[in-house]
Amino acid sequence: MYMLSEEYKRQIIDELLGKEAKDKGFKQEYIRKGLSTNYLGLFKRIVPGKSQGFDIYEDLIHEGKISLLCMGDSISYTYVDEFSFKEVISKFATYMREIGYKKMDESLQMKTFEKDDIALFVDSYINFAEKFFAKNNIDYLIKPNDLSVLLKKELEELFEIEFDKAKEILMEIAGTIAYYSLKNNDKVTIDKKENWLIITIQKYSRDGYPFFKEHNILYIIYRSYQMKNAAIIEKIINDVIGK
């Protein structure tokens, strides 16, 4: 593979995507590099009462794989040289122009969790989980598949309910996943990052290299509710308990 310097990669991103992002109110923030991920661009904007962002990052385990994460959706391509890297960034720019920015603008019109809601969830996610356990006469020893069925059913019942009436149950669902993963996987930690509750799981690549995967669980459940798609439940349950 033809090696590109980090500085040149960022220059390409700035040229092909950065100006439009800036026009939309986004600023590029700090760059961080982990064991398995190299963040080439973190774009953030602050709008009244909310923070929005999208990330461009490179997979250090799978050479040449680069991804765009926006509003919970991820698209990925592979590059092998300067030309194909520019092609990938151009595709990301087109995606943001045609889909990403519109989704972000539309989301500003939707009701969502306010800062006080998020703070309450961070402080009380175990209480929300215990409420769900009690309501369904279960505990954290329930089998993953059985829990997935219960959580999916609970989430699907909220699809036609307005957010203000649904948000406490959404917190119960998210809290249950967080607490269940913590109790059933010793590779899981629960942390507060940028005011949100983050589930972090230590995993290993096929080559045996450790890496960390993060889930902003309340936001994930909120997005599933907004999109009326409960399919993520089973996937995330299996992921957080190490399957």
Image (cartoon, grey):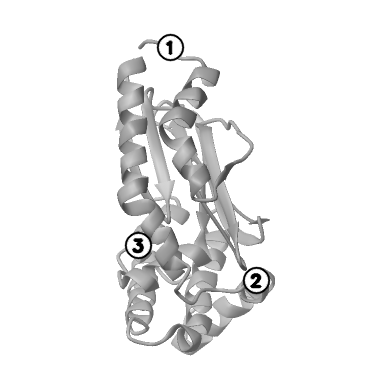
Front of the two marks 1 and 3: 1
- In the rendering, at what x and y percent does residue 27 appear? 58, 44
Q: Can you identify the residue that label 2 sits on? A: 115
Q: How many marks?
A: 3
Whichever of labels 3 and 2 marks the residue nearer the N terminus, that label is: 2
Mark 1, other Cα within 10 Å: few <14 / some 14–19 / many ≥20: few
- Residue drawn at the location 58% of the way across and 32% of the way down: 34
Indicate the secondary structure of the residue bearing disc 3. Answer: helix
Distance between mark 3 and mark 2 Cα atoms: 24 Å
Q: Mark 2 belongs to which amino acid?
A: Lys
Q: Quadrant of residue 49?
A: bottom right
Examine the rendered structure and indicate whether residue 220 appears above or below residue 159. Answer: above
- Residue drawn at the location 62% of the way across and 61% of the way down: 196
Whichever of labels 1 and 3 marks the residue nearer the N terminus, that label is: 1
Whichever of labels 2 and 1 marks the residue nearer the N terminus, that label is: 1
Indicate the secondary structure of the residue bearing disc 2. Answer: helix
Mark 2, other Cα within 10 Å: few <14 / some 14–19 / many ≥20: few
Which residue extends farthest top? 2
Q: Mark 1 belongs to which amino acid?
A: Met
Q: Can you identify the residue that label 1 sits on? A: 3
Q: Nearer the viewer, residue 243 or 171?
A: 171
Q: Nearer the viewer, residue 77 or 239?
A: 77
